[in-house]
Image (tube, rainbow, N blue to C red):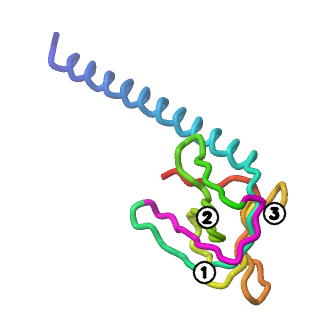
């Protein structure tokens, strides 16, 4: 086999390998997204309260939002998604949830699962809507 044929064979093999890896990675992301969408579509959690803490996570580009003065349909809540991460934890009249948005401010009011279309609604102290996640989807995967 000549050197030119060997090089073409190697380049062809690399292109096929990269294509297969890309297809597998995209299928995995699509499956994870479907699982995530289904989780939030069926989420029966309802929580309202006032933001008393915001902690930026350095390793995930996410924020942990702490809520006090909560009203919820659960006294305690700690259910992981099928993918593993927890969206919200309620314990001792405090709720903590994870989100990738940085539009939250201390003192804002939070409404999680208020209706069938909105997942999170954040309203400022001046009654201005700061953030609204219309669809019941929240990406908490990296």
Residue at 62% across / 68% down in the picture? 92
Can you say whether 102 is above or below 84 in the image?
below
Asked if labels 3 and 1 touch by Cβ distance under 8 angstroms, the answer is no
Label 3 packing within 10 angstroms: few (<14), some (14-19), many (20+): some
Residue placed under numbered mark 1 in the picture: 52
> Are circles 3 and 2 on residues that touch, CB within 8 Å?
no
Which label's residue is closer to the chain start, 1 or 2?
1
User: Does the segment drawn in magenta span residue 133?
Assistant: no
Task: Between residue 58 and residue 24, name the one nearer to us.
Answer: 58
Residue ID at (59%, 68%): 101
Residue beneath the point at 84% across and 54% down: 116
Residue 65, magenta (yes or no): yes
* Residue at which label 3 appears: 114
Crowding near the residue tagged with mark 2, few <14, some 14–19, many ≥20 C-alpha atoms within 10 Å: few
What kind of element bears circle 2?
strand
Residue 30 in the image, given as x and y percentages of width and height: 59, 37
Q: Quadrant of the N terminus?
A: top left
Residue, far bottom: 126
Can you identify the residue that label 2 sits on?
91
Task: Identify which residue, 115 or 20, lies in the foreground.
Answer: 115
Sooner in the amino-acid sequence: mark 1 or mark 3: 1
Quarter location, residue 88: bottom right
Task: Give the image location of residue 120, x and y in percent.
Answer: 72, 64
Q: Nearer the viewer, mark 1 or mark 2?
A: 2
- Give the magenta-colored segment's residue range: 60-74
């Amino acid at each position: 086999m000549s050197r030119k044929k060997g090089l073409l064979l190697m380049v062809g093999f690399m292109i096929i390998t990269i294509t297969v890896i890309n297809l597998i990675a995209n299928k995995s992301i699509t499956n994870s997204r479907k699982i995530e969408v289904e989780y939030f579509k069926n989420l029966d959690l309802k929580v309202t309260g006032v933001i008393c803490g915001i902690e930026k996570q350095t390793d995930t580009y996410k924020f942990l939002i702490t809520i006090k003065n909560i009203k919820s349909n659960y006294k305690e809540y700690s259910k992981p998604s099928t993918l593993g991460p927890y969206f919200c934890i309620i314990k001792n009249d405090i709720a903590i949830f994870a989100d990738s948005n940085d539009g939250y401010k201390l003192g804002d009011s939070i409404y999680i699962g208020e209706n069938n279309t909105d997942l999170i609604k954040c309203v400022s102290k001046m009654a201005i809507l700061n953030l609204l996640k219309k669809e019941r989807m929240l990406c908490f995967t990296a």
